[in-house]
Image (cartoon, grey):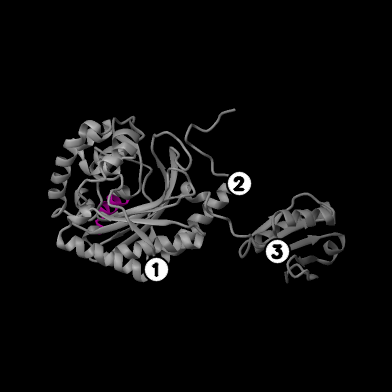
Amino acid sequence: MIHPLRGMKDLTFEDGKLFVHIVTTAIKIAKRYGYSYIETPILEATALFKRSVGDSSDIVSKEMYRFEDKGGNDVCMRPEGTAGVVRAFVHAKLDRQPIKQKFYYYGPMFRYERPQKGRLREFHQFGCESFGEASVYEDFTIITMISQIFHELGIGFNLQINSLGCPTCMPPYKETLVNFLIEIKNDLCEDCNRRIETNPIRVLDCKNQICQSLLVNSTKLINNLCEGCDTDFKKLTKLLDNAGITYKVDTNLVRGLDYYNKTAFEFVSNKIGSQSAIAGGGRYDKLVEFLDGKPTPAVGFAIGIERIMELVQMPEASREGIYLGAMTEDAVEKLFPIATAKRKETKVTVEYNAKGFKSHMKGADKVNARYVVLIGEDELKSGRVWVKDLESKEEKTVKVEVF
């Protein structure tokens, strides 16, 4: 037997139903907020992620499925969704249009890392990206939308927020942080020592408990924001307070991607083990420009679908559609014109084998049909069908053309 590769998982049976339920719920709500669908290739040029996510990020330096294709191109399987959407946005010259653009997407992402609960090498995300709106009101609206998605799916969460500043306040803070880190570098882990040189802000996100204990006394960016960033962050907290959305300011929340600025946030759950983030995102006002587009403010998020699958209860399925069956071999072929006509308006299950009444009723129950429709000898002779509503228990015999 050939098994799935390590860290890859089939989505079948109940998992498949749950996946579809999560995605359709998220799409429904995203559309209410004005988002339209976009799909980008799974395979992209490696340069896209090196320029956007950042060479120093764990994703690029350790986790990408990267290879040279037969044409000698340096390519990789997409490790996240935002960069590809921004590339598509620039490629389609949407950055040159005056209207604001909002897109949602879903699909597989790939990262080569140690598989564990809620973390796979092939995983799926649902995400949204909003282009052209610089107002912090859009940050708040994005957070509200995620809250609504989780509420509709019945998922509890804790919201963590932070501000990563802007090109005005980040450089002086970074200099102060580096000076602090150099003093304690001998006690920091190997990754943190490397990041001091490449991207010191990422040190704040280290999962090593010893490193985290050493960072308690570090200067916090939230206390060193410029006037504009400080005003926006205070406005965001006020909007969340007024909306009744509970949050915690996490001064070490920097996300794992280099393109974020200003607002950063994560939705976390304490019910899925150590990998507690179930959604995350923030503002990335410079990314369109980094990828050769016109300067365009943007904000977005992604939900880890596998992360939330075990938190979601499928709603009780109501009966739907029609079960069609024949009680005599001569009647089987009479089922197909009926099925073809009815499939224009509802789900239809056809039983190809002639069976007795009780067997057909059991078959209708197995597929959770609303109506069972049978043709026996009498119905075949009279050009009629027997119909029973399995919810109301009403039954009748009607002409085929009327049914």
Query: Which numbered disc covers residue 370?
Result: 3
Number of numbered tags placed on the structure image? 3
Region of the chain picked out in magenta, as a range: 85-94
Where residue 359 appears, as percent x and y from the top left, is 81, 53
Viewer-nearest residue: 107 or 112: 112
Type of amino acid under label 3: Arg
Type of amino acid under label 1: Gly
Q: Do residues under tags 1 and 3 come within 8 Å of each other at their CB atoms?
A: no
Marks 3 and 2 sit apart, C-alpha to C-alpha, by: 21 Å
**Mark 3: which secondary structure?**
loop
Q: Identify the residue position indicated by label 2 in the image.
A: 13
Closer to the eye: label 3 or 2: 2
- Residue drawn at x 70%, y 63% is 370
The relative height of residue 170 versus residue 319 in the rendered view (above or below) is above
The relative height of residue 98 versus residue 265 in the rendered view (above or below) is below
The quarter of the displayed image where residue 284 is located: bottom left
- Residue drawn at x 70%, y 60% is 369
Q: Identify the residue position indicated by label 1 in the image.
A: 244
